[in-house]
């Protein structure tokens, strides 16, 4: 079912929201562990349909053994599988990591490319993965729309869309340029820890005064209003 259409926020409210995010967290960071642009790319590929925490538990051994495309190819599919078998879909992901490492060696002189088009040609790399790598590794002002950001964009009124691409394109139009570099991190972290899917924690949300979501979720264990005693005749 497509997300419920919510009236888009005016430009002044969008500015206020991102100013609040910046004040609270001036330099937001992604939560995947990596050591270089190659290991970042691999970590993001592995994070599809998996949690960052789960990926971070599996990658220290993998990256110690294979911090470069050449070392990853030497490790082989079976060796990659052994390192990441705690991650969902690990067999398919191991094949993709092996194949993208081969492609980086053959086509890109073992370097991670810096364009979305070239990144999306690599096995296991889609638009969201490419945007994450471009943003974090190369500081390009891209917006990677995951399930959290998709929800926050639609729920708040920042960016309505039936698909991740629609939300991405909408955000690129409304987010002021000065906030674009960090916008997707702010929104993803907000969706992950505050604006949760089942029960958003509106009582501690720093953007609640501008957010269109209703009804706002009250704080847990909030005292109920006193019952009014029935009047006696």
Image (cartoon, grey):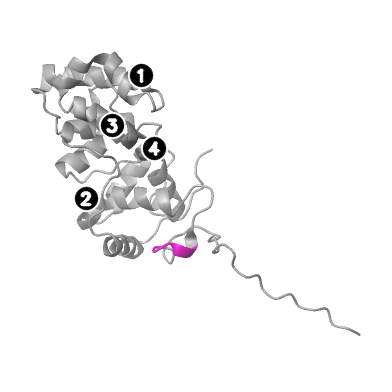
Between circles 2 and 3, the one closer to the viewer is 3
Would you call the spot at circle 4 few (<14 residues within 10 Å), some (14-19), or many (20 or more)?
some
- Residue at x-position 74% and y-position 75%: 227
Determine the CA span between mark 4 and mark 3: 13 Å
Between circles 2 and 4, the one closer to the viewer is 4
Q: Is residue 27 magenta?
A: no
Q: Position of residue 94 (x, y in %)?
A: 31, 20
Residue that mark 3 sits on: 59
Determine the CA span between mark 2 and mark 4: 23 Å
Q: Which residues are magenta?
A: 203-207
Between circles 3 and 1, the one closer to the viewer is 3
Determine the CA span between mark 4 and mark 1: 17 Å
Would you call the spot at circle 3 few (<14 residues within 10 Å), some (14-19), or many (20 or more)?
many
Between circles 4 and 3, the one closer to the viewer is 3
- Residue at x-position 30% and y-position 49%: 185
| SS state under label 1 | helix
């Amino acid at each position: 079912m497509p997300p419920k259409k919510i009236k888009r926020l005016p430009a002044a409210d969008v500015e206020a929201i991102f100013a609040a995010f910046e004040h609270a967290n001036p330099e937001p960071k992604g939560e995947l562990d990596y050591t270089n642009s190659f290991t970042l790319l691999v970590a993001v590929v592995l994070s599809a349909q998996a949690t960052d925490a789960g990926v971070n538990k599996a990658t220290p051994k993998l990256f110690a053994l294979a911090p470069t495309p050449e070392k990853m190819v030497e490790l082989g599919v079976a060796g990659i599988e052994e390192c990441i078998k705690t991650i969902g879909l690990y067999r398919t992901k191991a094949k993709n990591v092996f194949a993208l490492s081969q492609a980086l060696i053959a086509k890109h002189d073992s370097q991670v490319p810096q364009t979305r088009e070239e990144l999306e040609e690599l096995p296991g790399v889609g638009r969201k993965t490419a945007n994450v790598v471009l943003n974090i590794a190369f500081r390009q002002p891209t917006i990677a729309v995951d399930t959290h950001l998709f929800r926050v964009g639609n729920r708040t009124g920042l960016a309505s869309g039936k698909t991740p691409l629609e939300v991405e394109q909408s955000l690129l139009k409304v987010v002021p340029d000065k906030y674009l570099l960090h916008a997707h991190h702010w929104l993803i972290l907000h969706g992950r820890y505050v604006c949760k899917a089942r029960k958003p924690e509106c009582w501690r949300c720093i953007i609640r005064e501008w957010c269109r979501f209703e009804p706002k979720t009250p704080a847990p264990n909030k005292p109920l209003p006193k019952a009014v005693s029935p009047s006696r005749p």
